Amino acid sequence: MSTLTPQAPVKAQKPRGKLGDRLLFGYTWAVIIWLCLPIGVMILFGFNDYHGKYNTQWHGFTLKWYQHAFALPEVNNAMKASLIIAVISTVLATALGTLIGLALGRYRFKGQGFTNLVQFAAISSPEIVMGMSLLAFFVQLGFPLGYVTIIIAHVMFSLSFVAVTVRSRVLTLDRSVEEAAKDLGAGGWTTFRLVTLPMIMPGVTAGALLSFAISIDDFVVTNFTAGTVTTFPVDIYGLQGRGGIPAQVNVMGTFIFVGGLLLAAINALASRRRDA
Amino acid sequence: MTDTLPAIELVGIVKSFTSHGEIVQAVKGVDMKIAEGEFFSMLGPSGCGKTTTMRMIAGFDEPTAGEVYLHGNNVTGVPPNKRDVNMVFQSYALFPHMSVFENIAFGLNRKGIAKDEVTRRVGEMLDIVDLGGREKRKPKELSGGQQQRVALARALVNKPRALLLDEPLAALDLKLRQAMQVELKRIQREVGITFVFVTHDQGEALTMSDRIAVMSNGVVEQLGTPREIYERPATKFVAGFIGTSNLLSGTVSEVIDGHAVIAYGPEERVLVAVQNGQVIAGSEVELTVRPEKMELSANAPHGTDCAVRGTVTEVVYLGTSTNYNVRTSSGADVVVFTQNATSADDLAVRGDSIWLSWEPRHSYAIGAPS
């Protein structure tokens, strides 16, 4: 130990800076690994050559689950239901959320503060509370549970994400650009179609991607409002309770993940081209 | 008959806003007629109502009271997309997602003009604003001056009855601004369209305009040619806002021949033309004299009607000219500009007692006597 002490005295700032850099570097990678590890495990076990019920131990590499990716009708149907619900609720939430975002970013009106608050409340409220409340609401109304109620619920919680992203985009816009369009002879709708919408498009796309992402993997709210409809996450939960999750689930999970990555990459490329 | 109609006429324009529960009048009764083909400026400090007035001509704001006429047609209440005027915005307001060509073609496409006609007219316009070959660029890829010219082309290509320019040069640096001033004048001559130019820069307004409306606090203080406004400021505000003005005041001792005489002391007196009957002996008057109209001499001048004594408080040598700050015997601080053309020597140094003299036609009485 004593051999380490007679070190050449260096500037006090430098080693600390180096240590700080190293800590930051290590911490950053730790977080990235922490976030990616579960996804990595999920992808990896889609290639696991296991036999029997439990896909929990590594037995060797295989592509057979990819060859038989759609061999389980139950999982297929659940996936189909999830996709239908995600697409419809994304379209609805994007359309409605964009309008709310525009109104919030653009105009001053009575109840604006309250509307803003409701958006953030919807984002921050616990899903289990939302799910329970919606279930109680639908039951009280005597509304049959199914696709419609799931879609209503999904639109409800993803709408705020679109509204918030669009609103922040609208706030950065120069209003005189729209005035210029009107000045050059464009009516209200033409101005929106040719000028406003293209300018807020990055916010709209980001909001739509978010909506899709949170709709397709939603379990809690869906479980409350689904009735007899089984979506992909709800089905996985059921399978797990009934003994084991087949590797096809890992395969489809990988598809969803890769699909999400692709969408994000396309969006990044598109916005780079737009800004170029 | 149509030729005599003004391109733009404002009648009794008032605009009030509600701000924090209080009603604020931004424009308090403005009347003006802007002639066909004129380069007309609205000049004033920020908050004087000039931009609001312009926005009411464009149709972005509606007047609380009064009417806007374009070529004799009452357009009050008509939305901006149905008014035959176009605007160049201070921020340029180019469409960021469209190319230069698409930006300029926007107005023509809204009118449903045939494609090859659009291509031809946009091409023509690009030549006029000197941007040929840049039609495929996005606004972001252009310099500030180039963006400015795209904004100009985008408005002018529609051949509007009038072009409204809202501080279009404010974002440019000095050199580019001066170049664009000349450029704007050239373009206006070339296309022969009425330009209404809003600015807070008096130099800009004086250089470019045929006529100027000087505005302050929501009213037009004076409307006239640059020369009239500079040489004969009608109000104290105009005198102070445009160039440098010397303000003198005093009690009228007598009125002779349409001129009020203010006697400050033996041999010291100032003459100023006044409206007959409006000023009598004993009334207080204020008058302005431009610094370059005053002459500075060591001895009492002969044969001039306006002469006062003073002490030099500061001498500033500026190369082509020298500025003298002088305190007059009556206690007014005035500035005198002298050209350094003939003599290399300074006329006076700090602390010297001197005489200031000028011709009576260069002193102007300000405001109506109250």
Image (cartoon, coloured by chain):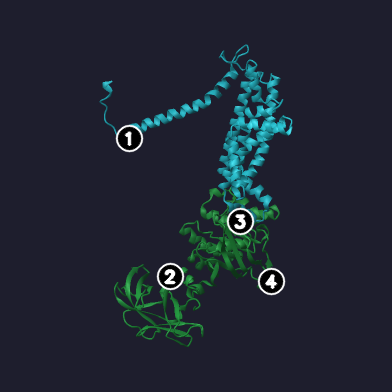
Question: Residue B244 has which mark?
Answer: 2
Q: Is residue B280 left or right of residue B34?
A: left
Shown in green, the chain is B
Residue at mark 4: B2
Q: Quadrant of the N terminus of chain A?
A: top left
Q: Chain of mark 3?
A: B
Q: Residue at x 61, y 29 (%)?
A: A128
Q: Pinpoint residue B157: horizontal percent, then vertical percent.
A: 63, 58
The Cα atoms of the two marked residues, 4 and 1, are separated by 81 Å
Q: Residue furthest bottom?
A: B257
Question: Mark 1 — residue?
Answer: A13
The amino acid pointed to by label 2 is: Thr
Q: Is residue B121 above or below residue A275?
A: below
Q: What secondary structure is marked by label 4?
A: helix
Amino acid under label 3?
Arg
Q: Alpha-carbon neighbours of circle 4 within 10 Å: few (<14), some, or many (≥20)?
A: few
Residue furthest front as drawn: A140
